[in-house]
Image: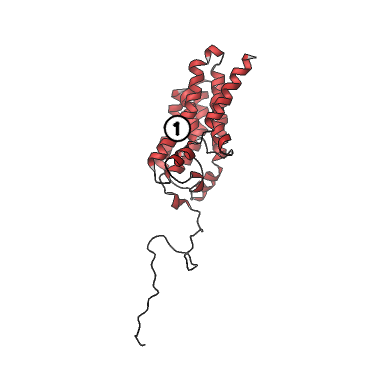
């Protein structure tokens, strides 16, 4: 019974920890708008950055990574006495990742899981996590597209594991996370192909879809900047 009970409890705990949507939690604590209400609508660090609050974005990134890192690390450090090995650690990491995508505490409306997946990889294999993060940084630096960097990194990660460290439960976990990451970026892929994807650091207002415009009180569209009225007329001047 214990052979299945402890792994099951560990996986459930990993999912519940992953279900903590820190983009929403931190935004609420800091008095910011819900990240699901602006920009891409994604509750993640990149979208929180579009609010203009870098501190909130950094905290979101950190805690989203930690919720993937800590459960896996706990299994690797203390799970041995309970019969929990690398396979269980990989499943716990996958559960935390799934919790971020479909959080039970937030109506199963989660983010795309990039930071959480990075935390999982760093805990399972620091070198694999480092190689994947380096891939993300290189692509993000040259392209300025967080989504493109995430997609490329997600595709490369399972190959890094397989080619350098061999097959095993980690490859399966990394492969599943990679496929889900690419799937969650489907809308971003379309925007990248259309040239309408938002770049890193772009404010939320700039992410409003083309064609949408706020309405002027008089019923006509207007621009946010440089708006002026020209209703005055010179009285008494005859033609």
Residue receiving disc 1: 63
Of residues 5 and 93, the one nearer the viewer is: 5
Examine the rendering and report whether any part of residue 57 can be seen.
yes
Q: In the rendering, at what x and y percent does residue 61 appear?
A: 44, 35
Q: In the rendering, at what x and y percent does residue 104 appear?
A: 58, 34
* Count of marks overlaid on the render: 1
Is 232 rendered above or below residue 176? Answer: below
- The colour scheme of the drawn protein is secondary structure
Q: In the rendering, at what x and y percent does residue 132 appear?
A: 46, 30
Identify which residue is drawn at 54% across, 23% down.
Answer: 90
Is 231 rendered above or below residue 105? Answer: below
Question: What quarter of the picture does the N terminus occupy?
Answer: top right
Of residues 126 and 23, the one nearer the viewer is: 23
Give the farthest residue toward the bottom. Answer: 238
Left or right: 26, with 185 as reference point: left
Identify which residue is drawn at 44% across, 24% down.
Answer: 127
Question: What quarter of the picture does the C terminus occupy?
Answer: bottom left
Is 114 rendered above or below residue 190? Answer: above
Identify which residue is drawn at 47% across, 22% down.
Answer: 125
Of residues 15 and 174, the one nearer the viewer is: 15
Q: Residues within 10 Å of mark 1 (few under 14, many from 20)?
A: many
Give the farthest residue toward the top. Answer: 81
Examine the rendering and report whether any part of residue 171 can be seen.
no
Name the secondary structure under disc 1: helix
Q: In the rendering, at what x and y percent does residue 225 appear?
A: 38, 60
């Amino acid at each position: 019974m214990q052979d299945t009970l402890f792994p099951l409890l560990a996986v459930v705990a990993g999912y519940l920890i992953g279900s903590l949507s820190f983009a929403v939690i931190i935004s609420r604590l800091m008095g910011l708008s819900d990240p699901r209400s602006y920009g891409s609508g994604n509750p993640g660090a990149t979208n929180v950055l579009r609010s203009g609050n870098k501190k909130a974005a950094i905290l979101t990134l950190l805690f989203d990574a930690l919720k993937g890192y800590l459960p896996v690390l706990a299994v690797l450090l203390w799970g041995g006495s309970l019969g929990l090995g690398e396979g269980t650690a990989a499943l716990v990491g996958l559960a935390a990742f799934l919790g971020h995508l479909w959080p039970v505490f937030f109506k199963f409306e989660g983010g795309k899981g990039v930071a959480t997946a990075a935390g999982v990889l760093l805990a399972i294999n620091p070198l694999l996590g480092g190689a994947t993060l380096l891939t993300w940084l290189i692509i993000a630096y040259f392209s300025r597209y967080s989504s493109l960097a995430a997609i490329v990194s997600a595709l490369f990660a399972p190959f890094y594991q397989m080619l350098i460290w061999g097959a095993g439960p980690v490859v399966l976990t990394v492969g599943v996370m990679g496929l889900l990451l690419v799937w969650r970026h489907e809308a971003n892929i379309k925007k990248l192909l259309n040239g309408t994807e938002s770049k890193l650091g772009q404010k939320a207002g700039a992410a409003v879809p083309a064609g949408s415009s706020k309405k002027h009180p008089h019923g006509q569209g207007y621009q946010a900047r440089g708006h002026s009225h020209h209703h005055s007329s010179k009285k008494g001047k005859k033609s």
